[in-house]
Image (spheres, rainbow, N blue to C red):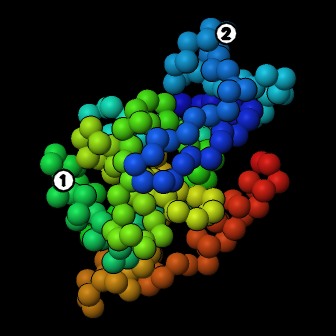
Protein backbone atom coordinates (compact mmCIF):
# COMPACT_ATOMS: atom_id res chain seq x y z
CA UNK A 1 0.00 0.00 0.00
CA UNK A 2 1.22 3.48 -0.81
CA UNK A 3 -0.11 6.82 0.42
CA UNK A 4 -1.15 9.64 -1.88
CA UNK A 5 -2.76 13.04 -1.49
CA UNK A 6 -6.11 13.45 -3.23
CA UNK A 7 -6.59 16.81 -4.84
CA UNK A 8 -8.96 16.23 -7.74
CA UNK A 9 -11.26 13.35 -8.63
CA UNK A 10 -10.72 11.51 -11.92
CA UNK A 11 -13.22 11.33 -14.74
CA UNK A 12 -15.45 8.26 -14.68
CA UNK A 13 -14.24 5.01 -16.17
CA UNK A 14 -15.94 3.85 -19.34
CA UNK A 15 -17.90 0.66 -18.87
CA UNK A 16 -18.71 -0.20 -22.49
CA UNK A 17 -17.46 -3.69 -23.44
CA UNK A 18 -14.36 -3.66 -25.59
CA UNK A 19 -13.75 0.07 -25.19
CA UNK A 20 -10.65 1.57 -23.55
CA UNK A 21 -10.73 2.89 -20.03
CA UNK A 22 -10.73 6.68 -19.73
CA UNK A 23 -7.85 8.54 -18.12
CA UNK A 24 -7.68 11.07 -15.36
CA UNK A 25 -8.24 14.77 -15.89
CA UNK A 26 -5.43 16.56 -17.68
CA UNK A 27 -5.48 19.07 -14.81
CA UNK A 28 -3.63 16.58 -12.63
CA UNK A 29 0.15 16.58 -12.47
CA UNK A 30 1.85 13.50 -11.09
CA UNK A 31 4.48 15.01 -8.81
CA UNK A 32 6.47 12.97 -6.33
CA UNK A 33 7.50 14.04 -2.88
CA UNK A 34 10.83 15.32 -4.20
CA UNK A 35 9.13 17.48 -6.82
CA UNK A 36 9.94 15.58 -10.03
CA UNK A 37 7.32 14.86 -12.71
CA UNK A 38 8.18 11.19 -12.93
CA UNK A 39 4.70 9.71 -13.29
CA UNK A 40 5.79 6.95 -10.94
CA UNK A 41 3.09 5.15 -8.93
CA UNK A 42 4.85 6.21 -5.74
CA UNK A 43 4.02 9.83 -6.52
CA UNK A 44 0.88 11.63 -5.52
CA UNK A 45 -1.36 13.79 -7.76
CA UNK A 46 -1.13 17.53 -7.41
CA UNK A 47 -3.84 19.53 -9.17
CA UNK A 48 -3.01 22.96 -10.50
CA UNK A 49 -4.22 25.59 -8.07
CA UNK A 50 -5.63 23.06 -5.59
CA UNK A 51 -4.99 23.00 -1.88
CA UNK A 52 -3.50 19.90 -0.27
CA UNK A 53 -5.82 17.52 1.52
CA UNK A 54 -5.17 14.78 4.02
CA UNK A 55 -3.38 11.70 2.65
CA UNK A 56 -5.57 8.76 1.69
CA UNK A 57 -4.59 5.12 1.32
CA UNK A 58 -3.85 3.95 -2.21
CA UNK A 59 -3.99 0.35 -3.37
CA UNK A 60 -2.73 -1.24 -6.57
CA UNK A 61 -4.31 -4.06 -8.52
CA UNK A 62 -2.40 -5.91 -11.24
CA UNK A 63 -3.14 -8.72 -13.64
CA UNK A 64 -1.26 -12.03 -13.50
CA UNK A 65 1.42 -11.00 -16.01
CA UNK A 66 1.70 -7.37 -14.93
CA UNK A 67 0.46 -5.92 -18.21
CA UNK A 68 -2.46 -4.16 -16.50
CA UNK A 69 -2.07 -2.05 -13.37
CA UNK A 70 -4.94 -0.21 -11.69
CA UNK A 71 -4.74 2.16 -8.75
CA UNK A 72 -7.44 3.09 -6.26
CA UNK A 73 -7.67 5.91 -3.73
CA UNK A 74 -9.42 5.88 -0.39
CA UNK A 75 -10.59 3.03 1.75
CA UNK A 76 -12.99 0.52 0.19
CA UNK A 77 -16.70 0.86 0.89
CA UNK A 78 -16.81 -2.84 1.73
CA UNK A 79 -14.90 -6.09 1.40
CA UNK A 80 -17.26 -8.95 0.56
CA UNK A 81 -17.40 -12.37 -1.01
CA UNK A 82 -20.34 -12.66 -3.41
CA UNK A 83 -22.07 -16.00 -3.99
CA UNK A 84 -24.78 -14.90 -6.43
CA UNK A 85 -25.49 -17.16 -9.38
CA UNK A 86 -24.16 -14.57 -11.85
CA UNK A 87 -20.83 -14.23 -10.07
CA UNK A 88 -20.44 -17.99 -9.87
CA UNK A 89 -21.30 -18.50 -13.54
CA UNK A 90 -19.08 -15.66 -14.71
CA UNK A 91 -16.15 -16.84 -12.59
CA UNK A 92 -16.36 -20.35 -14.01
CA UNK A 93 -16.56 -18.94 -17.53
CA UNK A 94 -13.53 -16.69 -17.07
CA UNK A 95 -11.53 -19.35 -15.22
CA UNK A 96 -12.01 -21.51 -18.32
CA UNK A 97 -10.12 -19.05 -20.51
CA UNK A 98 -6.52 -19.97 -21.42
CA UNK A 99 -4.12 -19.22 -18.57
CA UNK A 100 -6.75 -17.47 -16.45
CA UNK A 101 -5.93 -17.35 -12.71
CA UNK A 102 -8.52 -18.61 -10.19
CA UNK A 103 -11.39 -16.35 -9.12
CA UNK A 104 -13.61 -18.42 -6.82
CA UNK A 105 -12.44 -19.01 -3.26
CA UNK A 106 -12.63 -22.35 -1.46
CA UNK A 107 -16.29 -21.72 -0.58
CA UNK A 108 -17.33 -20.77 -4.10
CA UNK A 109 -17.44 -17.01 -3.58
CA UNK A 110 -15.79 -14.17 -5.45
CA UNK A 111 -13.95 -11.81 -3.10
CA UNK A 112 -14.42 -8.15 -3.99
CA UNK A 113 -13.27 -4.79 -2.70
CA UNK A 114 -16.12 -2.38 -3.40
CA UNK A 115 -14.93 1.13 -4.25
CA UNK A 116 -16.22 4.31 -5.81
CA UNK A 117 -15.55 4.12 -9.52
CA UNK A 118 -14.27 7.70 -9.63
CA UNK A 119 -11.46 6.60 -7.31
CA UNK A 120 -10.03 3.99 -9.66
CA UNK A 121 -7.69 4.74 -12.53
CA UNK A 122 -5.53 2.75 -14.93
CA UNK A 123 -1.80 3.22 -14.42
CA UNK A 124 -0.76 0.81 -17.14
CA UNK A 125 -2.47 -1.33 -19.78
CA UNK A 126 -5.92 0.24 -19.71
CA UNK A 127 -6.24 -0.51 -23.41
CA UNK A 128 -5.91 -4.23 -22.61
CA UNK A 129 -9.10 -4.37 -20.56
CA UNK A 130 -11.93 -6.17 -22.31
CA UNK A 131 -15.51 -6.39 -21.10
CA UNK A 132 -17.27 -9.75 -20.82
CA UNK A 133 -21.02 -10.13 -20.21
CA UNK A 134 -22.97 -13.22 -19.25
CA UNK A 135 -25.66 -12.20 -21.76
CA UNK A 136 -26.53 -9.23 -23.94
CA UNK A 137 -29.11 -8.10 -21.36
CA UNK A 138 -26.85 -8.46 -18.31
CA UNK A 139 -26.61 -5.20 -16.30
CA UNK A 140 -22.98 -5.88 -15.36
CA UNK A 141 -19.71 -6.21 -17.24
CA UNK A 142 -16.63 -8.00 -15.97
CA UNK A 143 -13.37 -6.52 -17.15
CA UNK A 144 -10.62 -8.98 -18.02
CA UNK A 145 -6.98 -8.29 -18.90
CA UNK A 146 -6.65 -9.57 -22.46
CA UNK A 147 -2.94 -10.29 -21.91
CA UNK A 148 -3.47 -13.08 -19.35
CA UNK A 149 -7.27 -13.37 -18.87
CA UNK A 150 -7.18 -12.16 -15.26
CA UNK A 151 -10.52 -10.75 -14.10
CA UNK A 152 -9.86 -7.27 -12.73
CA UNK A 153 -13.22 -5.79 -11.76
CA UNK A 154 -16.97 -5.78 -12.23
CA UNK A 155 -18.73 -2.64 -13.41
CA UNK A 156 -22.35 -1.68 -13.90
CA UNK A 157 -23.69 -0.46 -17.23
CA UNK A 158 -25.92 2.16 -15.59
CA UNK A 159 -25.09 5.15 -13.41
CA UNK A 160 -24.12 3.24 -10.26
CA UNK A 161 -21.23 4.97 -8.55
CA UNK A 162 -19.22 1.94 -7.48
CA UNK A 163 -17.20 -0.93 -8.91
CA UNK A 164 -16.41 -4.32 -7.42
CA UNK A 165 -12.71 -5.08 -7.83
CA UNK A 166 -11.31 -8.60 -7.68
CA UNK A 167 -9.58 -8.70 -4.29
CA UNK A 168 -7.22 -11.47 -5.42
CA UNK A 169 -5.58 -9.10 -7.90
CA UNK A 170 -4.48 -6.52 -5.31
CA UNK A 171 -0.84 -6.21 -4.29
CA UNK A 172 0.27 -6.01 -0.66
CA UNK A 173 -2.00 -5.76 2.36
CA UNK A 174 -5.64 -4.99 1.66
CA UNK A 175 -8.77 -5.10 3.86
CA UNK A 176 -9.93 -8.61 4.71
CA UNK A 177 -13.29 -9.91 3.53
CA UNK A 178 -15.88 -9.10 6.21
CA UNK A 179 -18.99 -10.90 5.00
CA UNK A 180 -20.46 -13.29 2.45
CA UNK A 181 -23.47 -12.03 0.49
CA UNK A 182 -26.11 -13.65 -1.73
CA UNK A 183 -25.61 -17.02 -0.07
CA UNK A 184 -29.23 -17.78 -0.95
CA UNK A 185 -27.84 -19.06 -4.26
CA UNK A 186 -25.88 -21.77 -2.44
CA UNK A 187 -27.24 -25.29 -1.84
CA UNK A 188 -28.73 -26.06 1.57
CA UNK A 189 -26.03 -26.99 4.04
CA UNK A 190 -23.24 -25.48 1.91
CA UNK A 191 -23.20 -22.03 3.51
CA UNK A 192 -19.85 -21.60 5.29
CA UNK A 193 -19.59 -20.43 8.88
CA UNK A 194 -16.26 -18.58 8.63
CA UNK A 195 -17.84 -15.13 8.17
CA UNK A 196 -21.23 -13.45 8.64
CA UNK A 197 -23.44 -14.67 5.80
CA UNK A 198 -26.46 -12.98 4.23
CA UNK A 199 -28.91 -14.41 1.76
CA UNK A 200 -29.08 -11.03 0.02
CA UNK A 201 -27.45 -7.65 0.63
CA UNK A 202 -27.34 -6.52 4.28
CA UNK A 203 -28.33 -3.03 5.37
CA UNK A 204 -24.74 -2.30 6.45
CA UNK A 205 -23.56 -2.79 2.86
CA UNK A 206 -26.43 -0.83 1.32
CA UNK A 207 -25.93 1.99 3.83
CA UNK A 208 -22.25 2.20 2.97
CA UNK A 209 -23.07 2.49 -0.73
CA UNK A 210 -25.60 5.25 -0.05
CA UNK A 211 -23.12 7.20 2.07
CA UNK A 212 -20.42 6.81 -0.60
CA UNK A 213 -22.80 8.12 -3.22
CA UNK A 214 -23.68 11.13 -1.07
CA UNK A 215 -20.00 11.87 -0.45
CA UNK A 216 -19.36 11.79 -4.17
CA UNK A 217 -22.32 14.06 -4.82
CA UNK A 218 -21.05 16.72 -2.43
CA UNK A 219 -17.56 16.47 -3.86
CA UNK A 220 -15.71 14.62 -1.12
Residue at the extreme bottom of the image, as rendered: 188
Q: Nearer the viewer, residue 17 or 9?
A: 17
* Left or right of 14, for residue 27: right
* Left or right of 12, for residue 132: left
The earlier-in-sequence mark between 1 and 2 is 2
Q: Which residue is mark 1?
A: 97
Mark 1 or mark 2, which is nearer to you?
A: 1
Tag 2's secondary structure? loop
Image label count? 2
* Left or right of 45, for residue 189: left
Q: Nearer the viewer, residue 219 or 80?
A: 219
Q: Which residue is mark 2?
A: 35
Q: CA–CA distance between discs 1 and 2? A: 43 Å
* Left or right of 150, for residue 140: right
Tag 1's secondary structure? loop
Label 1: few (<14), some (14–19) or many (≥20) C-alpha neighbours in 10 Å:
few
Amino acid sequence: MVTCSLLKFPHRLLVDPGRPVSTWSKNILWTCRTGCDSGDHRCHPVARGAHAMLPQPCFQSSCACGGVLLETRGRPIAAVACHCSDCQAAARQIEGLPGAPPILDACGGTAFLVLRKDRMRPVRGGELLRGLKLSSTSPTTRYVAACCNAMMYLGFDDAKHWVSMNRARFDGEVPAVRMRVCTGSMPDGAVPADLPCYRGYPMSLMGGLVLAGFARWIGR
